Image: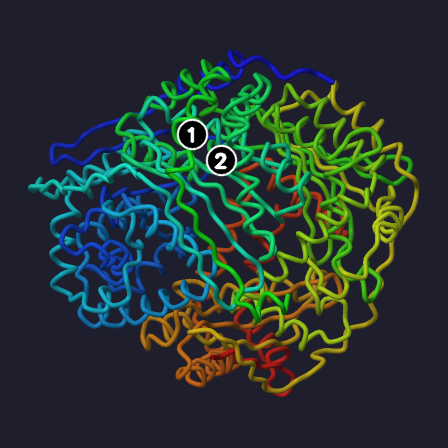
Amino acid sequence: MPKPVSSRADLDLLESFWRESVHRTVLPNGLTVLLKPDSSAAVASVQVWVKSGSVHEGAQLGAGLSHYLEHLLFKGTAQRAGRDISNLVQAHGGDINAYTSFDRTVYHIDVPSESVDMAIELLADMVLHSTLPADEVEREKNVILREIAMGQDDPDHRLAETLFATAFREHPYRHPIIGHREVFAAVTRDDLLRCYRSRYVPDNLVVVVVGDFELAAVEAGIRRHFGSVPRTSLAPVLIPVEPAQQAPRARHCFEEVEVSRAGLAWQIPGLTHPDAVALEALAMVLGAGDSSLLWHEIRQKAGLVHAIDATSWNPGTVGLFYISFTCEPAKREAATAAVMSALQRWAHRGLSPALVRKAVRQLVVGEINTRKTMSGQASRLGAAEVVIGDLDFSRTYFERLVKLKPADLQRVLRTYLNPHGLTSVSLNPTQGGAEAAGARAGVSEPGDFEEIVLPNGARLLLQPHAHLPNLHLRLSCLGGPVYEEPGKRGATSLLATLLTKDTKFRSAAAVARCIEEVGGVFSAFSGNNSFGLAVEVLPTDSDRALALLADAVLHPAVHRETFQQERDAQLAAIRQDNDDVVTFGRKLLRRKFFGPHPLAIDAQGDEPGLTALQPSDIAALHRRLMVAGNVVLSVAGDFEVRRLVPRLKAFLNRLPRGEVRSQAGAFAGAAEPGDFVERQPRQQAVVLQAYAGPALRAADYYVSEVADELFSGMSSRLFERVREEKGLAYFVRSARVVGLDAAMFCFMAGTAPDSEQAVLAEIDAEIARVAAGEVGAAELKRCQTRLKSARRMGLQTNSSRAAQAGLNALYGLPINDWKNYGGRIDGITIGQLADFARRYLRQEARVQLVVRP
């Protein structure tokens, strides 16, 4: 097995990125501009970073002003109404969104490259000329109040709030970004205007553009749209310094959840501190991946947790080193004690050089992965400018990283992760719940995949593309619910996971160590119709990747101990889903709609099915599904065809001949048409409707693609009516569960308990409008443009292209079928949408479900 390359060689991989030209300009009004041309894909990302987040709200800390403003900037400017904002972006095939964090608010538009100027002009108008209409202020307040309530229905969200409120006593991190409900509810339009006028000024903004564009033209557009606003004063915001923690803190909550979620945290210095590099490397060593120390010690060896990881989070002047895990309630205290004991042991004994090398490689690969998309590159530049204040910080950071020694990690472990500085939080079931259960800018776009069919029927798809030092291998097979035995649902998902664990020649720990020490990823995937394995590495590690993949496919070993651990983890994930009201509702809707059909249960399976499984079932399923006629291996990225292809063929030729057949019978439509109400201990309600829809290979499948887009998105008529005009729901959209021969088209919305029927009436009215042929030509055009652009932007990475090609081959479609996608979408008419609604979206054949408190 090849040894990992040296840390110095890892650093050399990043040199070409650091040499790439980034044009930084400060306009006379103080606005900062970052431009990076990249012609590797005909798309661009335009982002505006506002140096203002929840920690900058001064006397109104905890009010959520920054997040409130983020919502309102989509509601209209001096020259355009709110609905025109999303309509304009979608008409150009783009995506627009925003987010608010503790220290920034970011607005971003990803578009085809020919629409860059539109994105610049629109973001300038939104950020600098919003009017904050009074009626929208009130309407959006109700929306955010529902968002706060939805957050309180999410156990992971509640635990995060508990952590920050416990770990910080003075710093504004102790307040939720969205605000405290009572404080937020008292916010007025005048409060918002003061915040907007004081914080959204040129000297507090950074505009970032990355993509396929002409530098001079884009800079001129930014000067025209952003530079015309005069410089104004920018008052400093005093952020309190967090006192050093002097004693342990703890807060343990008991609620209606099914598994325990726990976190152990320690205060650490900010990202620019000299110890930040060692702390991030320590987090990788302790909790990044299945070969990490905590995963091996606490999960694999002790069997105390279902999952465990570690994170070093420190974007400001202070942060948290955080170890999180999920477990059975009875094991939480033992898991905590085991983690603390292990930390003390490693602090005393130290860590090996191999672990440090692995962490360095993982962080280098992570840095490379940020370059996969234009939006990723733009986000990296924005963070360097806004969070760090230095575009070259990445070079400084990684130069420090490669100089790390085991003693450096041992020192920060001793210094920061000590018992007296521990903050321990958890969210647990109540007693009843516990009992219940370089020159890269000039690289062209990638070409087509080439298909090679081997004598045994296995297929090999190849797309060489040297845009990044990145290689992705993806092995795909038909599988999922319709290929499983009744009463043993979830077997395919468990099989996929176990294929990344033990083999006849390597233990699960050895597999994890082998891939993670070179910064690679070896993962499983499973869905309604397929499953498989994916390996992503640097090109120099292609032999290692192929060796791991071949070993997993040809020589799996289902050890009972590993089987039990992974089955328990999958069962725990199912129980966690039950804690989320939306996921709970979607799963229940699916069961009522599909009835006895295998698609009634998603790829994860259900508790009875997983509990019934034995290792022999997994071995038998592997023998049945992992046959040559059911295997497609797609390879995309930086590789030499002459060198790699013979090795790939040799691997695939070892697969036994064979084909697979679905276990599902014919699908006759909704199993339980009618209206249902399910009561759950939640603050919000969720309404859902399910109808039959076109299956993946149906002639009208692409009509359902357009229909799904028509009913979803920020500029959809349904969204505008339900959320924007009437303020009835926080979210409303359509969705699909698509199989090869059966499908469900559904609607869902999160709303207040007293608004359920009003939301359902709006969904019914929108279906009737489409069935009557009242969709406008511009409305249809927007949907078509957005779908085509989303497909283009979704194929920027080697992994996404390999996945798409592999699934096309499995499903009997041309492997380069995305070339035909635009024509098929453009061919959909208003009449076809009307026929779709009349044929499929019939009330007498639907399942309607309301989940309410």
Q: Amino acid at mark 2?
A: Ala
Q: Residue 119: horizontal and vertical position, in percent?
A: 32, 47
Q: Residue 162: horizontal and vertical position, in percent?
A: 38, 55
Q: Nearer the viewer, residue 140 or 695?
A: 140
Q: Which quadrant: the N terminus?
A: top right
Residue 339 located left or right of residue 91: right
Q: Nearer the viewer, residue 165 or 557?
A: 165
Q: Residue 795: horizontal and vertical position, in percent?
A: 56, 42
Q: Mark 1–mark 2 contact, CB under 8 Å?
A: yes
Residue 153 located left or right of residue 293: left
Residue 506 located left or right of residue 828: right
Quarter location, residue 826: bottom right
Q: Which residue is most to the left? A: 233
Point 82% across, 43% down: residue: 558
Quarter location, residue 732: bottom left
Q: Residue 336: horizontal and vertical position, in percent?
A: 53, 45
In the image, is residue 111 above or below residue 71? Answer: above
Q: Amino acid at mark 1?
A: Asp
Disc 1, SS = loop
- Read off the residue under disc 1: 38
Tell me if mark 1 has few (under 14), some (14-19) or many (20+) residues whose alpha carbon lies within 10 angstroms of its own. Answer: many
Query: Does the rendering let one see residue 118?
Result: no
Q: How is the image coloured?
A: rainbow
In the image, is residue 553 above or below residue 406? Answer: below
In the image, is residue 367 above or below residue 787? Answer: above
- Read off the residue under disc 2: 41
Q: Nearer the viewer, residue 104 or 225?
A: 104
Point 9% across, 42% down: residue: 235
Query: Does the rendering let one see residue 666?
Result: yes
Point 71% across, 48% down: residue: 566
> Disc 1 and disc 2: Cα gap in Å?
7 Å
